[in-house]
Image (cartoon, rainbow, N blue to C red):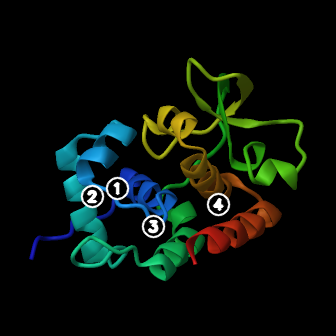
Amino acid sequence: MKKHSGMRPHDIVVLLKIAAKGNNAWYMKDLSMELSISASEISESLNRSAIAGLISKNKKRLMKLAILDFLEHGLRYVYPQQPGAKARGVATAHSAAPLNKEIVSNEPYVWPYGLGTVRGESIEPLHPKVPEACLKDPIFYEYMALCDALRVGRAREKNIAIEELRKRLC
Protein backbone atom coordinates (compact mmCIF):
# COMPACT_ATOMS: atom_id res chain seq x y z
CA MET A 1 0.00 0.00 0.00
CA LYS A 2 1.18 3.54 -0.74
CA LYS A 3 2.40 5.77 2.03
CA HIS A 4 -0.03 8.48 3.11
CA SER A 5 1.71 11.84 3.03
CA GLY A 6 -1.22 13.82 4.40
CA MET A 7 -4.37 15.24 2.90
CA ARG A 8 -4.24 18.26 0.61
CA PRO A 9 -6.92 20.95 0.32
CA HIS A 10 -8.01 19.85 -3.14
CA ASP A 11 -8.76 16.36 -1.75
CA ILE A 12 -11.82 17.87 -0.08
CA VAL A 13 -12.73 19.57 -3.36
CA VAL A 14 -12.58 16.24 -5.22
CA LEU A 15 -14.66 14.41 -2.59
CA LEU A 16 -17.32 17.10 -2.55
CA LYS A 17 -17.47 17.18 -6.36
CA ILE A 18 -18.22 13.44 -6.23
CA ALA A 19 -20.84 14.09 -3.53
CA ALA A 20 -22.43 16.77 -5.71
CA LYS A 21 -22.92 14.19 -8.45
CA GLY A 22 -25.24 12.23 -6.15
CA ASN A 23 -26.03 8.82 -7.58
CA ASN A 24 -24.80 9.73 -11.06
CA ALA A 25 -21.85 7.81 -12.42
CA TRP A 26 -18.53 9.63 -12.49
CA TYR A 27 -15.11 9.05 -13.99
CA MET A 28 -11.75 10.47 -13.00
CA LYS A 29 -11.38 12.14 -16.40
CA ASP A 30 -14.69 13.97 -15.85
CA LEU A 31 -13.61 15.16 -12.41
CA SER A 32 -10.33 16.32 -13.93
CA MET A 33 -12.08 18.30 -16.64
CA GLU A 34 -14.80 19.77 -14.41
CA LEU A 35 -12.37 20.83 -11.66
CA SER A 36 -9.45 21.78 -13.93
CA ILE A 37 -7.19 19.50 -11.90
CA SER A 38 -4.90 17.10 -13.74
CA ALA A 39 -5.96 13.45 -14.01
CA SER A 40 -2.86 12.34 -12.11
CA GLU A 41 -3.71 14.72 -9.24
CA ILE A 42 -7.28 13.38 -9.16
CA SER A 43 -5.89 9.84 -8.97
CA GLU A 44 -3.46 10.74 -6.18
CA SER A 45 -6.22 12.60 -4.35
CA LEU A 46 -8.49 9.55 -4.43
CA ASN A 47 -5.62 7.38 -3.20
CA ARG A 48 -5.00 9.70 -0.23
CA SER A 49 -8.73 9.78 0.53
CA ALA A 50 -8.94 5.97 0.40
CA ILE A 51 -6.03 5.64 2.82
CA ALA A 52 -7.67 8.22 5.11
CA GLY A 53 -10.96 6.30 5.01
CA LEU A 54 -12.94 9.04 3.27
CA ILE A 55 -13.70 6.94 0.19
CA SER A 56 -13.92 3.17 -0.12
CA LYS A 57 -10.79 1.23 -1.05
CA ASN A 58 -12.18 0.62 -4.55
CA LYS A 59 -12.78 4.40 -4.83
CA LYS A 60 -16.41 3.97 -5.84
CA ARG A 61 -18.30 4.90 -2.66
CA LEU A 62 -17.90 7.95 -0.44
CA MET A 63 -17.64 7.31 3.28
CA LYS A 64 -20.15 10.05 3.98
CA LEU A 65 -20.13 9.92 7.77
CA ALA A 66 -16.33 10.05 7.84
CA ILE A 67 -16.35 13.02 5.44
CA LEU A 68 -18.95 14.80 7.56
CA ASP A 69 -16.93 14.09 10.71
CA PHE A 70 -13.78 15.49 9.10
CA LEU A 71 -15.57 18.58 7.80
CA GLU A 72 -17.20 19.27 11.16
CA HIS A 73 -14.23 18.64 13.42
CA GLY A 74 -11.10 18.98 11.31
CA LEU A 75 -11.53 21.30 8.34
CA ARG A 76 -11.14 24.58 10.21
CA TYR A 77 -7.95 23.33 11.89
CA VAL A 78 -6.29 21.71 8.89
CA TYR A 79 -7.21 24.41 6.34
CA PRO A 80 -7.88 27.56 8.39
CA GLN A 81 -8.71 30.82 6.71
CA GLN A 82 -8.92 34.45 7.76
CA PRO A 83 -10.83 36.98 5.68
CA GLY A 84 -8.43 39.18 3.73
CA ALA A 85 -8.46 42.31 1.63
CA LYS A 86 -11.53 43.47 -0.26
CA ALA A 87 -11.78 41.96 -3.71
CA ARG A 88 -14.22 41.26 -6.50
CA GLY A 89 -15.18 37.63 -6.76
CA VAL A 90 -17.70 34.86 -6.19
CA ALA A 91 -19.71 34.90 -2.95
CA THR A 92 -18.91 32.16 -0.45
CA ALA A 93 -19.57 31.05 3.14
CA HIS A 94 -22.62 32.84 4.61
CA SER A 95 -22.80 35.12 1.56
CA ALA A 96 -23.76 32.28 -0.82
CA ALA A 97 -26.63 29.80 -1.00
CA PRO A 98 -27.90 28.12 1.07
CA LEU A 99 -26.71 30.16 4.06
CA ASN A 100 -27.53 33.57 2.56
CA LYS A 101 -31.22 32.74 3.03
CA GLU A 102 -30.77 32.41 6.80
CA ILE A 103 -27.90 34.73 7.62
CA VAL A 104 -27.97 38.42 6.81
CA SER A 105 -24.64 40.23 6.69
CA ASN A 106 -23.46 43.57 5.39
CA GLU A 107 -19.98 42.22 4.69
CA PRO A 108 -19.88 39.43 2.10
CA TYR A 109 -17.05 36.92 1.80
CA VAL A 110 -15.79 36.13 -1.70
CA TRP A 111 -13.32 33.93 -3.51
CA PRO A 112 -11.27 36.38 -5.57
CA TYR A 113 -12.18 35.81 -9.21
CA GLY A 114 -12.01 38.21 -12.12
CA LEU A 115 -15.42 37.25 -13.48
CA GLY A 116 -17.09 37.50 -10.08
CA THR A 117 -19.90 39.96 -9.46
CA VAL A 118 -19.65 40.51 -5.69
CA ARG A 119 -17.24 42.72 -3.78
CA GLY A 120 -16.26 41.64 -0.28
CA GLU A 121 -13.60 40.29 2.03
CA SER A 122 -11.51 37.68 0.25
CA ILE A 123 -11.31 34.04 1.30
CA GLU A 124 -8.74 31.77 -0.32
CA PRO A 125 -10.55 28.76 -1.84
CA LEU A 126 -9.36 25.22 -1.14
CA HIS A 127 -8.13 25.10 -4.76
CA PRO A 128 -7.57 28.02 -7.16
CA LYS A 129 -10.07 26.61 -9.70
CA VAL A 130 -12.95 26.32 -7.21
CA PRO A 131 -14.71 29.60 -8.19
CA GLU A 132 -14.74 28.65 -11.87
CA ALA A 133 -15.95 25.10 -11.14
CA CYS A 134 -18.66 26.37 -8.77
CA LEU A 135 -20.11 28.72 -11.36
CA LYS A 136 -20.71 25.68 -13.59
CA ASP A 137 -22.26 23.44 -10.89
CA PRO A 138 -24.70 24.97 -8.37
CA ILE A 139 -24.83 21.86 -6.16
CA PHE A 140 -21.04 21.74 -5.90
CA TYR A 141 -21.08 25.49 -5.23
CA GLU A 142 -23.31 24.95 -2.19
CA TYR A 143 -20.98 22.27 -0.82
CA MET A 144 -17.93 24.51 -1.19
CA ALA A 145 -19.67 27.56 0.31
CA LEU A 146 -20.76 25.46 3.29
CA CYS A 147 -17.16 24.33 3.77
CA ASP A 148 -16.01 27.92 3.82
CA ALA A 149 -18.63 28.69 6.46
CA LEU A 150 -16.98 25.98 8.57
CA ARG A 151 -13.55 27.51 7.93
CA VAL A 152 -14.39 31.17 8.68
CA GLY A 153 -17.84 31.32 10.23
CA ARG A 154 -18.93 32.07 13.75
CA ALA A 155 -20.64 29.43 15.89
CA ARG A 156 -24.12 30.03 14.43
CA GLU A 157 -22.90 29.86 10.82
CA LYS A 158 -20.90 26.71 11.55
CA ASN A 159 -23.89 25.01 13.18
CA ILE A 160 -26.19 25.82 10.28
CA ALA A 161 -23.51 24.78 7.76
CA ILE A 162 -22.95 21.40 9.38
CA GLU A 163 -26.71 20.74 9.45
CA GLU A 164 -26.95 21.62 5.75
CA LEU A 165 -24.00 19.35 4.96
CA ARG A 166 -25.59 16.55 7.01
CA LYS A 167 -28.81 16.90 4.95
CA ARG A 168 -26.87 16.71 1.70
CA LEU A 169 -24.38 13.97 2.56
CA CYS A 170 -26.39 11.55 4.70
The residue beneath circle 1 is: 8
Q: Position of residue 169 (x, y in %)?
A: 56, 72
Q: Secondary structure at mark 3?
A: loop
Q: Earlier in the sequence, mark 2 or mark 4?
A: 2
Q: How packed is label 1: few (under 14 Cα within 10 Å), some, or many (20 or more)? A: some
The residue beneath circle 2 is: 45
| Disc 1 versus disc 3: nearer the observer | 3
Q: Is residue 129 above or below residue 89?
A: below
Q: Which mark is residue 83?
A: none
Quadrant of the frame with the C terminus: bottom right
Q: Secondary structure at mark 2?
A: helix
The residue beneath circle 3 is: 23
| 1 and 2 marks in contact (CB < 8 Å) | yes
| Disc 4 versus disc 3: nearer the observer | 3
| 1 and 4 marks in contact (CB < 8 Å) | no
Q: Which mark is residue 150?
A: 4
| Disc 1 versus disc 2: nearer the observer | 2
Q: Is residue 78 above or below residue 95?
A: below
Question: In screen coordinates, is 43 left or right of 151?
Answer: left
As rendered, which of 34 and 7 lies closer to the eye? 34
